[in-house]
Amino acid sequence: MNKYKIAVRLALFCAAAIAVSCQKESLPPADICTNGECDATMVFPVQRDVNGYYHIPLDWSREYLPYFSVDVRASQVIPEFRYNDESVVRANFDSDTSWIIGDSLVMTVPIFRPFTGDWNQSGSPLPVGWQDISLNQFAGIEVNIAQPTTIYFSKKGQAMESRRVLGPFIPQMIGDTITVAMKVQWDAGMYSVTKDNYIEKFIIE
């Protein structure tokens, strides 16, 4: 009798297991972004030429090494995958160009006399002189013109936007063609999407 009950229970368990395995599995959504396929783009401050290159004019007359900014735009994720009704989209950058800081890096700082110095009309002190401070402790450090830190996008209209500063550039780079790459991730939990096929080329002038 006990053997019969065990056999019946085993048969029922197997039948239930087969039924569960035959059920249609939950499939991920076809698109996690509002406009269909998730996409992003880099927007340079100038138009690209007929060959697909951006010519970036920089101001080399300033006291500091020049740099410029690239605006970046990306799709939003659908509401089901937002956090507190906000899309979580992030990007990282890399480039094929870097330079090494030498032992002659100098920072110029102002010198103030808070009690005997002059003040401007807004109440801020005016410098009475300037002092050069050597920063040779940074000698040998490699500087990639695309910072590796992660940037996050914020909602602007129907898209997500952010900005990446490229640089600083040294005079030896004038005329060089530089490649910058962007990797973007759209956070949707286990259905997150990552794309790293965003590549642009620009020429320093």
Image (cartoon, helix red, strand yellow):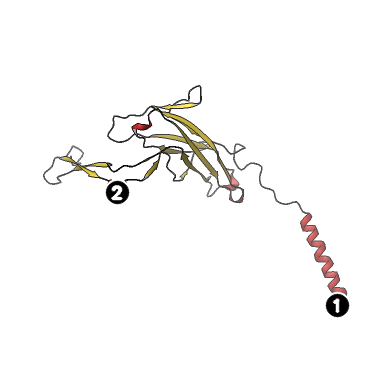
In the displayed structure image, the side of residue 40 where residue 145 appears, left or right? left
Q: Residue at x 30, y 36 (%)?
A: 64
Residue 156 placed where, x, y %?
48, 37
Residue farthest along the bottom direction in this orientation? 1
Q: Mark 1, residues whose alpha carbon is within 10 Å: few (<14), some, or many (≥20)?
A: few
Q: Residue at x 34, y 32 (%)?
A: 171
Query: The C terminus is located in which quarter?
Result: top left
Query: The N terminus is located in which quarter?
Result: bottom right
Number of the front mark, 1 or 2: 2
In the image, residue 48 sits, relative to residue 159, either above or below, namely: above
In the displayed structure image, the side of residue 7 where residue 158 appears, left or right? left
Q: Residue at x 35, y 34 (%)?
A: 170
Disc 1 versus disc 2: distance between alpha carbons?
Answer: 83 Å
Q: Are marks 1 and 2 in contact (CB under 8 Å)?
A: no
In the image, residue 145 sits, relative to residue 137, either above or below, namely: above
Residue 203 placed where, x, y %?
43, 28
Q: Quadrant of residue 197?
A: top right
In the image, residue 171 sits, relative to residue 21, either above or below, namely: above
Label 1 sits on a secondary structure element that is helix
Residue type (three-letter) at the residue carrying disc 2:
Gln
Q: Residue at x 49, y 34 (%)?
A: 42
The residue at which mark 2 appears reads as 137
Disc with the residue nearer the chain's start (1 vs 2): 1
Regarding residue 200, the answer to whether it shows in the image is yes
The residue at which mark 1 appears reads as 2
Label 2 sits on a secondary structure element that is helix
Pick the front one: 4 or 82? 4
In the displayed structure image, the side of residue 172 where residue 12 appears, left or right? right
Residue farthest along the left direction in this orientation? 116
Residue type (three-letter) at the residue carrying disc 1:
Asn
